[in-house]
């Protein structure tokens, strides 16, 4: 578990996962590859951004995003409303997944059956390349430590990176991933620091109102899962949500 800097320049965080991409919808591992939002993802960002702007992000936030295009597109929906600058930081990119990137779950199972079996069983995945989970948390925390002082930072990132960052801030280990569950596309969590300790006050927040056609806002169902390092229940789609 990564050590959390004791002097982060913000005391509130909104951690916002990017909107949907075609690869999310297809259950394809994106990692640090760079597909853009699809039409649904852009619609999600356009719907969620005003809610953040009128709610938790109304308090003169710093907005920082992964430099991958799906996160930048999502973040700009908010910064355009708020009239604030968008910072980008490569340290907020998604968990690097090596040879799994660009593949669906089924393709990983077929091409790398031993790795896939280790992942499903909760064993460390060897030989895939990419990053260890601890490094993802370390680089994301380093990015936050260099933000300017502000009452709030909105961090626009990815499913795996969001999970590792929250675990580090809250002092949780991999076993807690099934309790919290992953962020869905364009969902956010809010954390506050009180007396030197981070506390989760909202998790996986989504649109409260119906959208097009009068029905509920569309959302990919994602079971609580773990990272590719610890394994987890397979989602029918949105592979990156359970990183």
Image (spheres, helix red, strand yellow):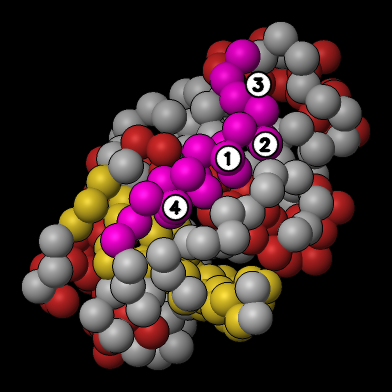
Q: Position of residue 236 (x, y in %)?
A: 64, 48
Q: Is residue 208 magenta?
A: no
Q: CA distance from mark 4 to mark 1?
A: 11 Å
Viewer-proximal residue among 62 and 231: 62
Q: Position of residue 86 (x, y in %)?
A: 19, 57
Q: Which residue is denoted by mark 4 in the rendering? A: 145
Q: Which residue is denoted by mark 2 in the rendering? A: 134
Viewer-proximal residue among 6 and 214: 6
Work out whether residue 228 can be spotted.
yes
Q: Which residue is denoted by mark 3 in the rendering? A: 108
Return the disc, 2 or 4, that comes first in the chain's sequence: 2
Residue 135, placed above or below residue 83: above
In front: label 4 or label 1: 4
Viewer-proximal residue among 217 and 141: 141
Return the disc, 4 or 3, that comes first in the chain's sequence: 3
Q: What is the magenta segment's predominant secondary structure?
A: helix
Return the disc, 3 or 2, that comes first in the chain's sequence: 3
Do tag 2 and tag 4 residues touch (Cβ < 8 Å)? no
Which SS class for mark 2? helix
Do tag 1 and tag 2 residues touch (Cβ < 8 Å)? yes
* Residue under the image location 44 percent in, 52 percent down: 145
Lateral position of residue 156 relative to residue 26, left or right:
left
Q: Which residues are magenta?
A: 129-148
Counting the numbered discs, the total is 4
Q: CA distance from mark 3 to mark 2?
A: 23 Å
Which SS class for mark 1? helix
Residue 148, placed above or below residue 119: below
In front: label 2 or label 4: 4
Q: CA distance from mark 4 to mark 3?
A: 35 Å
Do tag 4 and tag 1 residues touch (Cβ < 8 Å)? no
């Amino acid at each position: 578990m990564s050590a959390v800097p004791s002097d982060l320049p913000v005391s509130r965080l909104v951690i916002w996962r990017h909107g949907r991409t075609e690869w999310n919808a297809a259950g394809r591992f994106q990692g640090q590859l760079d597909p853009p939002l699809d039409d649904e993802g852009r619609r999600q960002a356009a719907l969620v951004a005003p809610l953040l702007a009128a709610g938790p992000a109304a308090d003169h936030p710093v907005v920082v995003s992964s430099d991958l295009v799906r996160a930048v597109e999502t973040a700009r929906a908010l910064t355009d409303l708020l009239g604030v600058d968008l910072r980008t930081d490569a340290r907020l990119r998604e968990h690097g997944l090596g040879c799994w990137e660009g593949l669906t779950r089924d393709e990983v199972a077929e091409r790398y059956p031993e790795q896939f079996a280790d992942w499903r069983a909760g064993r460390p995945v060897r030989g895939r390349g990419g990053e260890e989970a601890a490094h993802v948390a370390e680089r994301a925390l380093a990015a936050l430590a260099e933000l300017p002082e502000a009452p709030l930072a909105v961090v626009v990132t990815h499913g795996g990176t969001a999970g590792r960052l929250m675990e580090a801030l809250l002092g949780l280990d991999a076993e807690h991933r099934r309790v919290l569950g992953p962020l869905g596309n364009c969902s956010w969590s809010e954390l506050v620091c009180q007396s030197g300790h981070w506390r989760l006050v909202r998790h996986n927040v989504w649109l409260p109102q119906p959208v097009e056609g009068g029905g509920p806002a569309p959302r990919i169902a994602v079971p609580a899962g773990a990272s590719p390092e610890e394994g987890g229940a397979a989602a029918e789609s949105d592979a990156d949500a359970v990183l």
